[in-house]
Image (tube, rainbow, N blue to C red):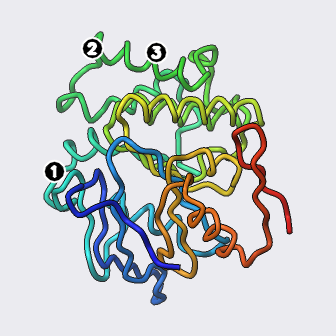
Amino acid sequence: MKPTTPSPSDRGALAAHDLSIRLAGRDIVHAADLRLPAGRWTAMVGPNGSGKSTLLKALAGLLPARRGGVELLGRPLNDWNGRERARTLAWLGQDEAVSAELHVRDIVMLGRLPHQGWLGRPGDGDAHAVSRAMVLAGCEALADRLFSTLSGGERQRVLLARVLAVQAEVMLMDEPLTNLDPPHQADWVKLVRGLRDAGTTLLTVLHELGAALQADDLLLVRNGQVLHHGAVAEAATRQCLIDVFDGRIELHAVNGHWLVLPH
């Protein structure tokens, strides 16, 4: 399997060049090269322990590179100041630490911090962005609840709203469907497609292959290496997905969607 990337004329929204990451003395990501086209949804998929979350964190600038680098909108990530980068690239990680005694609206408002001056108070624009984010994430009814009183799925929707409130051009999400029931997973797919249609670039790590196959592109990772990056519509991409899981899955087209079954 060979990586496929957009044409060199497309600078891409987010790119990595020869990116290698080492944690605790062990190489986790090996010489990753990728370029995410702007305004598309890419799902990163691979077996457990393949380095997906580590690669995503490195792309977000949360882990230092042993070798290589990352570019955001054609500029080295390290050239962006913190506030500018936080307005442009939003991050949703796994098991994020949040004060359990904050109200939901206040947690979502944290997504507006990159847009506010030092010690600045939220304005009308911030309040509107927060309200809209909570509606999109389906947690507007929870606005006055304490985070500590929420279920796992409710907490996940609140954290999603916080990311949406940033209104970033590029969004990275690590296992965003965690704790969401099937209807809310379907809502999330619809939401992501709407963001994509509005011009947002999205990269999401997913274990739910049915949801991943509804993305525009797949980024397939195994053993810390990017094995393939291509459109879901391409038969070669779908075959590489099967190969990444050692032929233990089958894909069947049903009513315009891909059904994933064990082989």
Q: Dot 3, crowdedness within 10 Å: few (<14), some or many (≥20)?
A: some
Q: Quadrant of residue 74?
A: bottom left
Q: Quadrant of the C terminus?
A: bottom right
SS label for mark 2: loop
Looking at marks 2 and 1 on the same chain, the residue that comes earlier in the sequence is marked by 1
Out of 141 and 253, give the one closest to the viewer: 253
SS of the residue under disc 3:
helix
Residue 226, disc: none
Q: Which residue is mark 2?
A: 123
258 lies left or right of 64:
right
Q: Amino acid at mark 2?
A: Gly
**In this orientation, which residue lies closer to the viewer: 122 or 60?**
60
Between the residue at mark 3 and the residue at mark 1, the CA separation in whole angstroms equals 28 Å
Q: Residues within 10 Å of mark 1 (few under 14, many from 20)?
A: few
Q: Are marks 3 and 1 in contact (CB under 8 Å)?
A: no
Residue sitting farthest toward the top = 124
Q: Evaluate if marks 3 and 2 touch, with contact meaning CB atoms under 8 Å apart.
A: no
Q: Residue at x 30, y 62 (%)?
A: 15
Which residue lies at the image location 59% right of the left edge and 75% below the top edge?
50
Residue 30, percent across and down?
Answer: 42, 83
**Is 247 left, or right, of 228 in this rendering?**
right
Instruction: Nearest to the eye among marks 2 and 1: give it.
Output: 1
Q: CA distance from mark 2 to mark 1?
A: 23 Å
- 240 left or right of 81 in image: right
Label 1: which residue? 81
Numbered disc 1: secondary structure: loop
What residue sits right under mark 3 in the picture?
Answer: 131
Residue depicted at 77% across the width and 36% down the height:
182
Discs 2, 1 touching: Cβ within 8 Å: no
Q: Counting residues from the N terminus, which is met first, the one under dot 3 or under dot 2?
A: 2
The single residue placed furthest to the front in the displayed view is 235
Where does residue 187 sit, x and y in percent of width and height?
65, 29
